Image: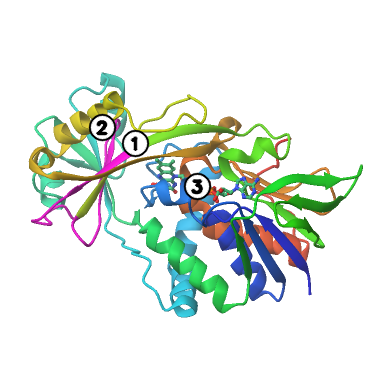
């Protein structure tokens, strides 16, 4: 039995806690607010490894994680008895008349290119500016807020301790080991510590992770005619089963600045209405924002650290929902079976 303390109750911390527990470890998650309150509940929940502009060897990681998804979700549903809003609805990634000639040419030669008429067959009601698109049938979404609830219920079903409202102030360490966590609930000690604190990582440990703010909003689609994710160059539009449409997201390097701005929401709405005009008449139901954990080159920081018993699991930037299953698997393979993490290198 390993005693593992996971710092951070987002999708990465919870998914890893569950995978470790199912391999026999005794796990505690320490979360300063409510689980999922960070980037996890702010996200759109797309699983889009091909459209997310991933580069280098993390493309393969994204595709592998997408492949793991069905089984990962089935396990969560079995443990939690809850639906996660997992929906392989496909993604239409439009090429707009405003795109550069080079981009248009490159995309029109892509094996997944479909012309304007075929794009409209996949999803009716697309805007005039759409010249054609990439059709990505294997991509889709998970309802990240439902997923959070399912992760929590699954964790509880496995007797994972979740200490919400508990802040880690300091990771107390000597030259080679973490000795304990100094927290608002006192000293916490384990055999192994996992750092899964998203955009807030740097406050606890010197890693090059910074927040990149994303503003979002949702509207209500009474007709429920939108059945595909639309992933345009300047916005994405994600329909949920209940008629909610999520529209995102701005990309702002403004630190932890709170709040939605008029300019941010106007930009999202203008871009979304251009690619799916019916949005113009839909009621706005919610606006929100979140902080993506950005790491250099958009590569997650995973695996061993300079401290023997501290494992890093941060920097998932705009793909942490997609990357959760493979992250949980890689970390469990490392911690339980000693298999080093190959596809990513831990940046320090
Ligand atoms: C607007 C937006 C849209 C996105 N859309 C998508 C998408 O469509 N698809 C996709 O795959 N990804 C998307 N992402 C990215 C995804 O949400 C993140 O990569 C992912 O949620 C990161 O998960 P995490 O667990 O590492 O971090 P978080 O969810 O941020 O969790 C970190 C947790 O650590 C806790 N914590 C921090 N410091 C401490 C401390 N000192 N003590 C105790 N607890 C602490 C925080 O309270 C937080 O709950 C989006 C993100 C944003 C902001």
Q: Is disc 3 placed on a helix, strand or loop?
A: loop
Query: Is ligand 1 closer than 8 angstroms to the Cβ of mark 2?
Result: no
- The answer for how far apart the CA atoms under marks 2 and 3 are is 21 Å
Q: Work out whether mark 2 precedes mark 3 in sequence or the reverse, and give the earlier one.
A: 3
Camera-side residue: 123 or 4?
A: 4
**Above or below: residue 91 compared with residue 329:** above
Residue visible at 38% across and 66% down?
84
Query: Is ligand 1 closer than 8 angstroms to the Cβ of mark 1?
Result: yes
Q: Look at mark 3 in the image and give the residue it sits on.
A: 38
- The answer for how far apart the CA atoms under marks 2 and 1 are is 7 Å
Question: Is 199 positioned to the left or the right of 86 in the image?
Answer: right
The image shows residue 4 at horizontal and vertical percentages of 74, 64
Camera-side residue: 152 or 207?
A: 152
Q: Look at mark 1 in the image and give the residue it sits on.
A: 249
Q: Work out whether mark 3 precedes mark 1 in sequence or the reverse, and give the earlier one.
A: 3
Q: Look at mark 2 in the image and give the residue it sits on.
A: 268
**Above or below: residue 262 compared with residue 69:** above
């Amino acid at each position: 039995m390993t005693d593992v303390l996971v710092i951070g109750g987002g999708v990465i911390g919870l998914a890893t806690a569950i995978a470790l527990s199912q391999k026999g470890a005794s796990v505690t998650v320490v979360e300063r607010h409510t689980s999922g309150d960070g980037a996890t509940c702010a996200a759109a929940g797309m699983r889009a490894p091909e459209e997310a502009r991933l580069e280098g060897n993390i493309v393969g990681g994204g595709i592998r994680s997408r492949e793991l998804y069905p089984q990962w979700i089935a396990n969560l549903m079995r443990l939690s008895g809850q639906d996660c809003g997992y929906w392989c609805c496909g993604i239409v990634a439009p090429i707009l008349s405003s795109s550069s000639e080079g981009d248009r040419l490159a995309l029109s030669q892509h094996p997944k290119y479909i012309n304007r008429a075929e794009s409209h067959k996949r999803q009716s009601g697309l805007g005039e500016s759409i010249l054609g698109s990439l059709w990505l049938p294997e991509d889709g979404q998970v309802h990240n807020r439902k997923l959070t609830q399912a992760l929590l219920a699954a964790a509880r079903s496995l007797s994972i301790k979740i200490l919400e409202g508990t802040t880690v102030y300091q990771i107390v360490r000597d030259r080679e080991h973490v000795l304990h966590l100094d927290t608002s609930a006192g000293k916490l000690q384990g055999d192994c510590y996992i750092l899964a604190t998203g955009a807030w990582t740097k406050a606890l440990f010197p890693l090059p992770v910074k927040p990149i703010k994303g503003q979002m909003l949702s509207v209500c689609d009474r007709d429920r005619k939108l059945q595909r994710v639309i992933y345009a160059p300047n916005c994405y539009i994600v329909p949920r089963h209940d008629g909610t449409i999520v529209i995102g997201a701005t990309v702002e390097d403004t630190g932890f600045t709170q709040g939605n701005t008029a300019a941010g929401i106007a930009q999202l709405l203008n871009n979304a209405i251009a690619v799916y005009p019916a949005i113009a008449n839909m009621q706005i139901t919610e606006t929100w924002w979140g902080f993506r954990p950005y790491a250099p080159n958009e590569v997650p920081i995973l695996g061993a650290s300079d401290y023997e018993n501290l494992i890093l699991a941060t920097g998932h930037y705009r793909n942490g929902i997609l990357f959760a299953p493979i992250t949980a698997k890689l970390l469990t393979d490392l911690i339980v079976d000693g298999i080093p993490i190959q596809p990513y290198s831990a940046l320090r």
